[in-house]
Image (cartoon, rainbow, N blue to C red):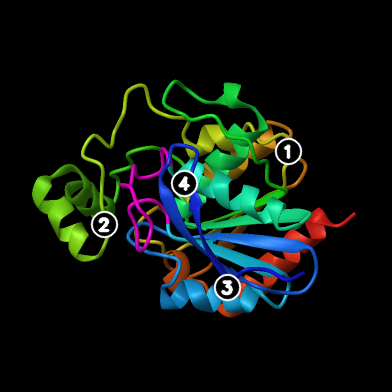
Amino acid sequence: MNLPTSATLVAADGVQLAITLTPGAGSVAFVVVHGFSGHGQHEQVRAIAGRLAAYGSVITLDLRGHGRSGGESTVGMLEVLDVDAAISWARDLGFTTVISVGFSLGAAVCIRQAALALDPAHGTVNDPILHSPVDAVVAVSGPAFWYYRGTPVMRGLHWLVETRTGRGLLRIRNTRIRPDVWPTPRPIEPVVAASKLGHTPLLVVHGTADRYFPVEHPNAIYRAAVTSGNPDADLWLLDGIGHAEAAVDMATIDEIAKWGLSRCSD
């Protein structure tokens, strides 16, 4: 396939998104979704994309309010539209299998996107309508619950998001936050979304030394998927590993790719 290496997409609500394609072999595309205050061109995200390219093509994007994309971050609520647009783009390019791989905030967004794309009725009034189902989901270092404040790091993150001073500091890192970021009623949270995936394969990866979200989070997500009857839910707890893109080694990225390909093979 003669494929573009970059593009500007427009999410369903009009937000412009910067997106990059790293071509690989075959008809599989991995959509890699970064964590909070990151972006698709970050060194660690690019390293992960380069590693995954040995197994298929890789799409990276800047979530709204991050990096080169427009709009403002809603910390996981409307970012599902961004991932939905990336998956739709992958289908338009001819990829027959699309696997979303999210880190931290991106992990929560990927689980939510997968559930909402299967059936919009899974969401609440604050969840948008999605149209692009995914073939498998990988959630690395993701939260299970909305507005979690149980660790010092997450209490600090809430201060950054909720205060004018904090949002100003985040702008220095090119992360723009919408002020009314915590809506009521709450959008469907990741642990509930995990129970709505049907038979969509789900891999939950989490480090036991994660300072953001303790292991109750991956355990809850995995348990929700299994209890709902998903036969293709797996949980990998990585001993001594920390949080998200910065902590996961390339050998684990290899195993994630192999897991995705094995779950999506005919």
Q: Alpha carbon of mark 4 to alpha carbon of mark 3: how far?
A: 28 Å
Q: Alpha carbon of mark 3 to alpha carbon of mark 1: how far?
A: 28 Å
Query: The C terminus is located in which quarter?
Result: bottom right
Return the residue at label 3. 49
Q: Residue at x 59, y 71 (%)?
A: 5
The picture places residue 90, in percent across and down from the top left corner, at: 66, 55
Question: What SS does tag 1 mark?
Answer: loop
Q: Alpha carbon of mark 4 to alpha carbon of mark 1: how far?
A: 19 Å
Return the residue at label 1. 230
- Principal secondary structure, stretch drawn in magenta: loop
Please state which of the two labelled residues, at mark 4 or mark 3, is closer to the viewer. Answer: 3
Q: Residue at x 43, y 29 (%)?
A: 187
Closer to the N terminus: mark 1 or mark 2?
A: 2
Q: Is residue 68 magenta?
A: yes
Q: Are marks 4 and 3 in contact (CB under 8 Å)?
A: no
Q: Residues within 10 Å of mark 4 (few under 14, many from 20)?
A: few
Return the residue at label 4. 216
Please state which of the two labelled residues, at mark 4 or mark 1, is closer to the viewer. Answer: 1
Task: Kindly identify the amino acid type of the residue bearing the numbered disc 2.
Answer: Val
Foreground residue, 68 or 46?
68
Closer to the N terminus: mark 2 or mark 3?
A: 3
Query: The N terminus is located in which quarter?
Result: bottom right
Q: Alpha carbon of mark 2 to alpha carbon of mark 3: how far?
A: 27 Å
Q: Residues within 10 Å of mark 3 (few under 14, many from 20)?
A: many
Q: Is residue 104 visible?
A: no
Foreground residue, 208 or 94?
94
